[in-house]
Amino acid sequence: MPHNKTMTNTTRDIHSPRIADAWAVLQAHSEAGNPLEPAASRLAFADPEFLLRRETRGIRLQLEMLKPDLEQRAHGIENTVVVFGSARFRSEEESVAMLAQAEAAGDTVLADRLRKLGRNAHYYEKARTFGGLVAKYSADKEPSEKLFICTGGGPGIMQAANRGAHEAGGISVGLAIALPMEEEANPYVPPALSFKFHYFALRKMHFMMRAKALVAFPGGFGTLDELFEVITLVQTGKAKPVPIILFGSDYWKRLINFDVLIEEGAISPNDLKLVEYVDDPQIAWDIICKFYQL
């Protein structure tokens, strides 16, 4: 009996919260200012030195795939409307304030740059309106019928869409990427749904996993990268057809001449049906509603 009693008292359930003790020890070690040295005795799942090795990259990829998926499921997020766009476009109010500050400081170079960005502040306001439209539609729907705004989680157009959803009483998702000169995640994404990725590929996969539509506002290289990834997946049949909406017809038509691709035989005329140009948040939402007969 004593032997059995001892075994009962010392055996731990592997699902017990105390499994986090390994991380607590590691944190205490760090807070004490001690450098982290390789240690064979450290539990593998609580060993950053081990997890950051080249050979464990596959594990890191799996974790970046699994963590956001489980958390979104827990929040009932099955369908999203993905919004891309420049991180540099600010609200009209913030654009005016930033320009005034630069002019007061006599920084002509910065002021000139801010004037250019200020011309695009209306896109921030329109993305904000669009985010609100999606959230308002979903407010009284069953979980399986709800649509949630999903962005890259950063500032600019991303913040605007998340902000619109938040102001309409909805929740939204942010899929941020760790970059050398990154800004903090925007405040309109709930902390539980504000994810950060190391791998662009896994981030893009998460954008598409739940996407029922893509709305691309004017942006730079990142926006173009994400846009063409989606167009390619749909064109090649690797992803199911979804509305791909280019918001800001003048911007997109000046930036990309798709007709050249047809003239040179690089794409077929039918491929242009994959995208639609809009300039109004309500029209963008109407296209999505028509596609899914909402």
Image (tube, rainbow, N blue to C red):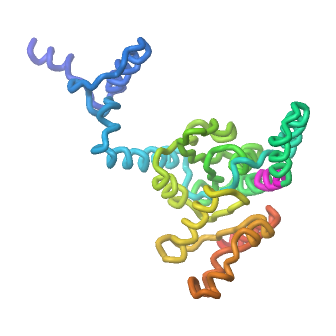
Q: Nearer the viewer, residue 149 or 155?
A: 155
Magenta run includes residue 127 = yes
Q: Is residue 202 visible?
A: yes
Write the residue at 69% across / 40% down.
188
Task: Indicate the position of residue 87 as horizontal and vertical percent values.
Answer: 69, 48
From what the image shows, is residue 246 above or below residue 223?
below
Q: Nearer the viewer, residue 214 or 292?
A: 214
Task: Indicate the position of residue 287 as horizontal and vertical percent values.
Answer: 73, 71
Q: Is residue 146 visible?
A: no
Write the residue at 41% across / 48% down.
66
Task: Indicate the position of residue 242 as horizontal and vertical percent values.
Answer: 60, 70
| Helix, strand or loop: magenta stretch | helix
From what the image shows, is residue 220 above or below residue 106?
below
Write the residue at 30% across / 22% down.
37
From what the image shows, is residue 163 above or below residue 270?
above
Q: Nearer the viewer, residue 31 or 239?
A: 31
Magenta run includes residue 54 = no
Q: Which region of the structure is painted magenta?
A: 120-128
Quadrant housing the C terminus = bottom right
**Left or right of 82: which side holds 95?**
right
Task: Indicate the position of residue 250 as horizontal and vertical percent values.
Answer: 80, 69
Q: Nearer the viewer, residue 114 or 184?
A: 114
Write the residue at 73% across / 53% down.
131
